[in-house]
Image: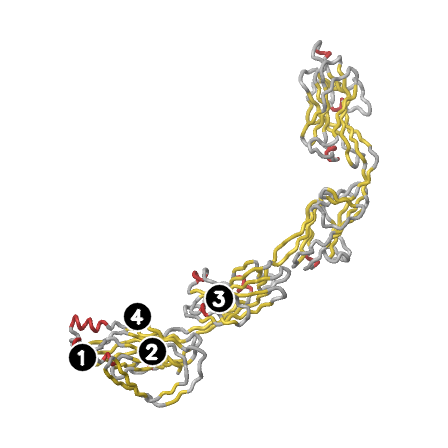
């Protein structure tokens, strides 16, 4: 069967008595239809009101010939099945009229003696009548159905609440700072000054050296302090002490002069033996340590024939020895100097001095003769610490340059520092400014200061409420003259907006599968200077396919929705699932704001199907050779839909 569909647009229709003469296949056949005379005036719609398309499956008209060939059957029932699917435009509301024409009756009459076909349209006014069908015959080849009030399903999808937006996918955007809105997210950044290259010339009392800021020292006259054994150290292996009571260290702690042979330690062992002694802490020494000198007063009982004694120290867990000495037969002072700590290879510190151990190593002085003549003997050990006393200026300041001259700032958040030393009697304070004139403590007190603690710490600056550059800090160093605080590093931490981000909505499904018309996209946005939000949309027939669907703007994949109320691209028509994507951009010190998005949609709840539900026929004869030239058993049908 041939069927023809026509897209319907409405013009002004005049319904009148018609006489239609058809000349088909060289023969002649006439049929007529008559309707009531009248004129109908209606408003012209803006586009198609409906489409009428041939259905995928059709009645099997070949069975007429099959029954004739196999059963010699010349009369029977018309095969049933679907003919046309009528789809109203998604937004159309009102009545429609479906016209059905059988256009090849002249050819049908060459095969059929009579032919009656029942056609039926559910949801038409005629479907509620008795009979509920219309008949197409060889004598009357057209009919029509009045379709009841067409009411599209419609609704709208809106995202505006915090929960709406939080269900979406956020990429460098934020939904919590301003609940109910989407804005660009912020991230933390910092400017760090390790070598203090970002400060103005400091005051005269301040020095910047080796990555440290400190008060300048005022050198004094060189001096020294003597430290003597006061308790046993880590080694006590020399064979003999005299007197035999007490400890080895108290045999060599003579002060200020040695006591000859009144007290001593000695050995005539062929192997080296060692004593180490803890020392009194320093009392008067200050400033820079110039040297550490360890001295022993020792002798040999006979003229020696080998070196038999040396001084030693132990610092930071490591032992270091002086040069072995060949001893005199009278008490003589032998020394070794260390100008720097041999373990650190750096200047001595007073802490290292207070933890220092000193001592001696000895073996026999003579390798022959009686054993009593082979002794090496030591009566005194002491340590001299040479230093240059230092005093410090009582105060000094540094002031930074603007630390944030090119940064895009949303908020200045905190100030980090590393002060490796703030000794007793010293202090380190800081205050902050945005104009290098008016200074504030971190809590916003004008002229106030924040006192730093030793080590690494953070000062919270959020109470200042500063949301833009510039930024300066001013640091005050104070001392009682005996020492200086040490500042090693500072950094200022700030927040800035991402330059771009995007928000993908959660998928939306109206609740049932209809060929939806997604109408327009409406949105409320705020776009400060230099900021922007644009949109794209994707759709699919199921939620899985939606995840990989292509994003479209109003005309293509390369443009965007920029104006609220823009028509949605027709590529999305008929899809069941939808998402939108909002693209955010800004200059990093400001952000656009998305407050809500609304997408209205509409759709017709079903298609209207014109179908064959029965009827009968009889052929002219059982011999097709007796049929007229151009015969056919298959009706050709034409469908037209107009506004009622």
Q: Nearer the viewer, mark 2 or mark 3?
A: 3
Question: Residue 174: which quarter of the image?
Answer: bottom right
Give the spatial CA distance, label 2 vs label 3: 35 Å
> Does label 3 or label 1 sit earlier along the sequence?
3
> At x 50% / y 72%, what residue is drawn?
567
Q: CA distance from mark 2 to mark 4?
A: 16 Å
> Which residue in the protein does label 2 denote?
639
Secondary structure under the numbered disc 2 in the rendered image: strand
Q: Position of residue 593 (x, y in %)?
A: 59, 65
Residue closer to the observer: 362 or 435: 435
Give the Cα distance between marks 1 and 4.
28 Å
The numbered dot on residue 556 is 3
Give the percent coordinates (x, y) of residue 176. Answer: 59, 61
Q: Earlier in the sequence, mark 2 or mark 3?
A: 3
Q: CA distance from mark 4 to mark 3?
A: 35 Å
Q: Are marks 4 and 3 in contact (CB under 8 Å)?
A: no
Which secondary structure, mark 4? loop
Q: Which residue is mark 4?
A: 57
Residue 417 is at least partly visible in this image:
no
Placement of 424 over or under 158, stated as above or below? above
Q: Residue furthest right?
A: 221
182 vs 104, left or right, is right
């Amino acid at each position: 069967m041939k069927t023809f569909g026509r897209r319907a647009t409405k013009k002004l229709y005049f319904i009148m008595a018609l006489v239609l003469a058809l000349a088909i296949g060289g023969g002649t056949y006439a049929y007529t239809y008559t309707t009531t005379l009248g004129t109908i005036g209606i408003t012209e719609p803006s586009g198609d009101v409906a489409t009428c398309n041939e259905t995928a499956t059709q009645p099997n008209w070949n069975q007429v010939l099959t029954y004739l060939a196999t059963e010699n059957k010349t009369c029977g029932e018309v095969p049933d099945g679907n003919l046309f699917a009528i789809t109203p435009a998604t937004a159309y509301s009102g009545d429609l009229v479906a016209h059905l024409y059988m256009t090849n009756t002249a050819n049908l009459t060459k095969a059929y003696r009579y032919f009656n076909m029942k056609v039926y349209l559910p949801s038409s006014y005629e479907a509620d009548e008795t009979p509920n069908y219309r008949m197409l015959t060889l004598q009357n080849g057209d009919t029509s159905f009045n379709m009841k009030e067409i009411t599209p399903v419609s609704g709208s999808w809106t995202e505006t609440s915090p929960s709406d937006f939080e269900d979406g996918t956020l990429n460098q955007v934020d939904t919590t700072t301003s609940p109910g809105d989407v804005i660009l997210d912020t991230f933390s950044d910092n400017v760090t000054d390790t070598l203090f290259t970002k400060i103005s010339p400091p005051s005269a009392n301040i020095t910047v050296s080796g990555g440290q800021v400190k008060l300048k020292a005022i050198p004094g006259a060189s001096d020294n302090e003597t430290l003597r054994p006061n308790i046993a150290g880590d080694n006590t292996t020399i064979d003999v002490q005299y007197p035999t009571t007490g400890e080895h260290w108290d045999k060599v702690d003579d002060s200020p002069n040695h006591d000859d042979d009144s007290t001593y330690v000695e050995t005539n062992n062929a192997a080296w033996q060692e004593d180490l002694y803890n020392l009194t802490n320093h009392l008067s020494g200050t400033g820079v340590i110039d040297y550490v000198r360890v001295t022993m007063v020792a002798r040999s009982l006979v003229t020696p024939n080998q070196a038999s004694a040396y001084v030693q120290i132990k610092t930071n867990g490591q032992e270091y020895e002086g040069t072995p000495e060949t001893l005199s037969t009278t008490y003589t002072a032998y020394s070794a100097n260390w100008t720097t700590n041999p373990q650190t290879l750096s200047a001595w510190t007073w802490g290292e001095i207070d933890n220092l151990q000193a001592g001696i190593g000895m073996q026999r002085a003579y390798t022959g003769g009686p054993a009593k003549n082979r002794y090496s003997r030591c009566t005194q050990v002491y340590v001299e610490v040479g230093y240059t006393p230092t005093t410090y200026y009582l105060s000094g300041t540094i002031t930074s340059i603007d630390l944030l001259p090119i940064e895009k700032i949303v908020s200045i958040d905190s100030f980090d520092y590393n002060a490796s030393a703030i000794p007793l009697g010293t202090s380190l304070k800081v205050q902050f400014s945005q104009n290098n004139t008016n200074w504030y403590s971190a809590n916003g007190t004008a002229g106030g200061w924040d006192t730093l603690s030793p080590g690494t710490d953070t000062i919270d600056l959020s109470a200042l409420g500063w949301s833009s550059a510039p930024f300066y800090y001013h640091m005050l160093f104070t001392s009682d003259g005996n020492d200086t605080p040490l500042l090693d590093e500072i950094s200022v931490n700030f927040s800035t907006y991402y330059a771009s981000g995007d928000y993908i909505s959660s998928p939306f499904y109206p609740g049932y599968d209809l060929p939806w018309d997604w109408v327009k996209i409406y949105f409320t946005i705020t776009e400060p200077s230099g900021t922007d939000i644009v949109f794209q949309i994707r759709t699919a027939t199921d939620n899985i396919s939606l995840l990989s669907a292509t994003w479209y703007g109003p005309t293509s994949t390369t443009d965007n929705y920029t104006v609220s109320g823009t028509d949605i691209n027709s590529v999305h028509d008929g899809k069941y699932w939808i998402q939108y994507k909002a693209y955010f951009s800004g200059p990093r010190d400001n952000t656009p704001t998305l407050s809500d998005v609304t997408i209205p949609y509409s759709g017709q709840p079903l298609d209207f199907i014109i179908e064959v539900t029965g009827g009968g026929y009889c052929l002219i004869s059982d011999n097709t050779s007796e049929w007229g030239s151009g015969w056919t058993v298959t009706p050709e049908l034409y469908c037209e839909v107009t506004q009622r």
